[in-house]
Image (tube, rainbow, N blue to C red):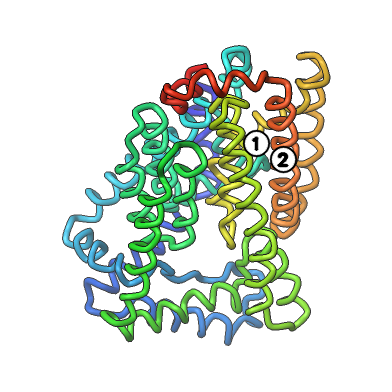
Amino acid sequence: MLVVAAMPIWIAFDPPGWDVAIYHAAIRAIVAGHDPYADAIAVQNIFHAQMALHPSASPPYSYVYSPITLPFLRLIGAVPAWLSGGLYWLIYLAGVLAQIWVGMQASEDNEHRYFIYLAPVAAFFPGFLANGIVLSGNIAYILYALILLTAVMGWRRSTWRWFYLAILAASCVKAPMLSLVVIPILTARRQWVPAGITTAMGVALFATQPLIWPTLFHHYLQAVELQFSYNRDFGCSPAGLFSGVLFDHGIPYSPASFVFYLCYAIPLLAFLLYLSRKFLSGGFSLRQWIPVLLVGVILLNPRLIEYDVAPLALPLALIGWRFLASFTTTRKTILYLALFFAVANNIALRSWDVWKLSDGPLLVLFFVAGSWNLLLRSHRRPAAIGNSIEAVDITNLAFHS
């Protein structure tokens, strides 16, 4: 009730929907028969050519989703703006709530009584750090909700086809989301083939676009490049932070950043597979595995921006809680976690650049802490547990244990 009461006041001081405005501009351009990428690039070029006249103004952003999404924008453009906008915001709200709901599914019974009070404010702390990005209206909130909800369906019913369809749809909008296809591999058996087929289809959908829309695709790549060269929007992933350092020193960030990404992404994926074998053999439950799994899988995204870490608010808090609870009392766990939260946010809120510099290392720190805790649990649990349930659907059993 307090959050709902605070929202109108917050919106009065910080108008929402800045990403929705970008989508709306692209729709208007398509309806008018224009190239949405070229129109936005022209605006960006004019702004940066005259940047000395307005040094404190916020730079314009362009539509940076691939051409395969444009036919859908054309369909939306045929609907009255008040109707399409109203429906979008309703779906968006449902997506935000769905992310919080999925995060709460990972809480144990003894944790739920505390985390139920954190859930209402989770949307305002993406990546554990305060940020008002939930007001943006970015479609990532809907896409992550769709992926996470279908993942829960897969864990509960051992049915993954809807998850793979969600991954394909999300990758058409944001290609890096294809990395989330490893979730079934890491939580269920016999998923390598469907995950591989889904990956191949996602890559094929992206690779055929320059053949179907050569000019639009070229302009799309230009728009993506300007996200980096004009707006320095590399994100907070290790590869993104590395690219930002190279960019600031006038050093080409490609292909060095890609090599750097592979140097940590491959070992990370191998370690996730190792942990998943521990999970599948009964070393720890799915509720214990989900937070670490989500942080690790999202770290596989080479460009993490604030929307990508939004689903991690509750999982990160759960990792911190469980790490501290493994060697201290509940009261001290609450105290230490609150102190860490306050210090981390006090540092991150100094500036937007500091926020990104803080959140990247924070994700790695929480992943290491969560992994250590899972390995500790797996060593404590008798090895006989894994052998005693081989004939049972391990994912369903672990989810409810």
Q: Position of residue 104 (x, y in %)?
A: 52, 26
- Looking at the rendered structure, the number of numbered marks drawn on it comes to 2
Instruction: Evaluate whether residue 314 shows in this view.
Output: no
Q: Position of residue 98 (x, y in %)?
A: 42, 34
- Counting other residues with Cα less than 10 Å from the Cα at mark 2, is it few (<14), some (14-19), or many (20 or more)? many
- What type is the residue that disc 2 sits on? Phe
* Image marks 1 and 2: residues in contact by CB distance under 8 Å: yes
Instruction: Evaluate whether residue 246 shows in this view.
Output: yes
User: Label 1's element?
Assistant: helix
What numbered label is drawn on residue 316?
Answer: 1
Determine the image quadrant of residue 251. Answer: bottom right
User: Label 2's element?
Assistant: helix
Q: Please name whichever residue, 236 or 301, is drawn nearer the observer in this view of the structure.
A: 301
Determine the image quadrant of residue 374. Answer: top right
Look at 51% across and 84% down and name the residue there: 45
Determine the image quadrant of residue 343. Answer: top right
- Counting other residues with Cα less than 10 Å from the Cα at mark 1, is it few (<14), some (14-19), or many (20 or more)? many
- What type is the residue that disc 1 sits on? Leu
Relative height, residue 31 to residue 350 (above, below)? below
Look at 41% across and 77% down and name the residue there: 220
Side (left or right) of 357 relative to 48 = right
What numbered label is drawn on residue 366?
Answer: 2
Q: Position of residue 197 (x, y in %)?
A: 35, 57
